[in-house]
Amino acid sequence: MKNIVILISGGGSNMAAIARAAQKEAWQEKRGVRLAAVVSNQPEAKGLGLAKSLGIATEVLSHSSFDSRESFDAALMARIDRHAPALVVLAGFMRILTPGFVVHYAGRLINIHPSLLPAFTGLNTHQRAIDAGCQVAGATVHQVTTELDHGLILAQAVVPVLPGDSADTLAARVLTQEHLIFPQAVRVFFEFGGGIT
Ligand code: GAR
């Protein structure tokens, strides 16, 4: 069995999109790919309830219980490694990771970022795209490297920036596309990019 561990901090809608694709397409039965656990660094993350409702095991590891980034990441690695993951997915996991963490999962760590990388790394991507006068925006799934929001691009989706858009309306438009490209990038990672067969 190839285990996936998904890390979240918030709503978990991308996690749910991957979980729903996995269930609908019988990844476990047909591909031997299983969502082993959803781990949140935020005890109140809405995505925890969503994961439970989808039948996925959840765990909480609150970063505020640790006095350094290194000690939190070491504990997080220990949690994740209990599942011997083939893939670790950052799905709205709002933490900067230490180089030790990233190197440990090199080649099996992917992230979704709400911009068309390499444009707009970091935070407030939608407002920055609007302020820059961009006519398109989007999202990127990429491999994680020690440089924030860099790494090999695995999938991208483009949406228009419409007159009158706020950061929220643009974010909502981008998010609907994130829910398509993230499951697809996971399928491709496990080399069954064609989807349902
Ligand atoms: C998504 O838009 C994702 O791209 C973004 O957080 C949101 C999480 O939504 N990620 C980042 O900004 C990472 N730097 P979700 O919890 O509903 O999946």
Image (cartoon, grey):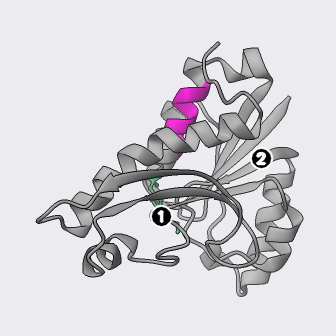
Q: Which residue is mark 1?
A: 116
**129 relative to 161 in the view: left or right:** right
Residue found 80% across the figure and 69% down from its top: 102
Across and down, in percent, residue 33 comes to: 76, 29
Report the amino acid beneath label 1: Leu
Task: Give the extent of the magenta segment.
Answer: 15-22
> For the view shown, which residue lies furthest in the left direction?
164
**Residue 34 picture location, percent across and down:** 73, 30
Q: Earlier in the sequence, mark 1 or mark 2?
A: 2
Quadrant location, the N terminus: top right
Q: Secondary structure at mark 1?
A: loop
Q: What is the C-alpha distance between the residues marked 1 and 2?
A: 23 Å
Image quarter of the C terminus: top right
Q: Please, is residue 18 above or below residue 155 in the view?
A: above
**What is the quadrant of residue 103 in the picture?**
bottom right
Q: In the image, what residue occupies the spot 76% across and 76% down?
A: 146
Question: For this view, does 131 lie left or right of residue 143?
Answer: left
Q: Please, what is the dominant secondary structure of the magenta stretch? A: helix
Relative side of 104 to 29, left or right: right
- Which of 68 and 161 lies nearest the eye of the viewer? 161
